[in-house]
Image (tube, grey):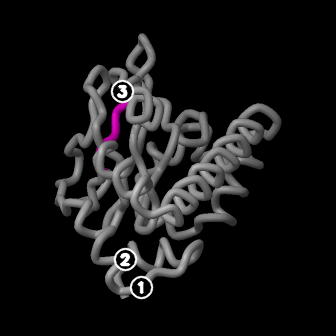
Amino acid sequence: MHLLRKHIERIIPLTDSEFDYILSHFTSKKYRKHQFLIQEGDLVPHEFFVLKGCLKSYMLNDEGKEHILQLAIEDWWISDFEAYNKHTPASLNVDCIEDSEVLVLTYENREKMCAGMHKLEHFFRKISNSGYVALQQRILCLLSSTAKERYDKLLLQYPHLFQRVPKSVIASYLGVSRETLSRLV
């Protein structure tokens, strides 16, 4: 079964023709390791569903330090969602940690699908809510947990990331230096 279909059907059932209709609104694209999908300042007409690979969304501060907002692997969505939904320039960068394959969905196609298929609008509302909850939990964890607690939680939730993602990326995601991460391990 197609990964996108499995993903959608966790929330709503689909017929074959409905899934074909949905899939027709996406384009498939491959990116190489370190290739950008979005760069700060760009307009962001797309969101991305990850079929294969690992990506990160992040910002660079004035000193050039990377602050990772999100990691995305297979079966996850990634974009600069504020820029995507508000049609404003990106404040984030999104690039590939590994060679990646994604399904690309334009804002216009998402709106068209949702207008024509109410249950798809329900699906996007549910995943948006789930994303909001996950981001809230991440912020609360960053504010109230020690570096060791954040590390342990990430290891417990996503142990496979530690085999796929460089330690420098894990450190940036946890909000610690590479040296601090080494002491936590």
Q: Quadrant of residue 176?
A: top right
Residue 114 x %, y %: 44, 55
Q: Amino acid at mark 3?
A: His
Q: Which residue carries the number 2 mark?
A: 18
For disc 3, the marked residue is: 87
Find out whether residue 94 is within the magenta segment. yes
Q: Earlier in the sequence, mark 2 or mark 3?
A: 2
Nearer to us: label 1 or label 3: 1
Specify whether residue 100 is in view. no
Q: Position of residue 174 (x, y in %)?
A: 60, 41
Magenta residues, start to end = 92-96
Q: Secondary structure at mark 2?
A: helix
Residue hosting label 1: 15
Measure how far apart labels 2 and 3 are at the Cα level: 28 Å
- Looking at the picture, which amino acid does disc 1 mark? Thr
Classed neighbour count for the residue bearing mark 1: other residues with Cα under 10 Å, few (<14), some (14–19), many (≥20)? few
Residue 170 percent location from the top left of the image? 51, 48
Q: Is residue 179 magenta?
A: no
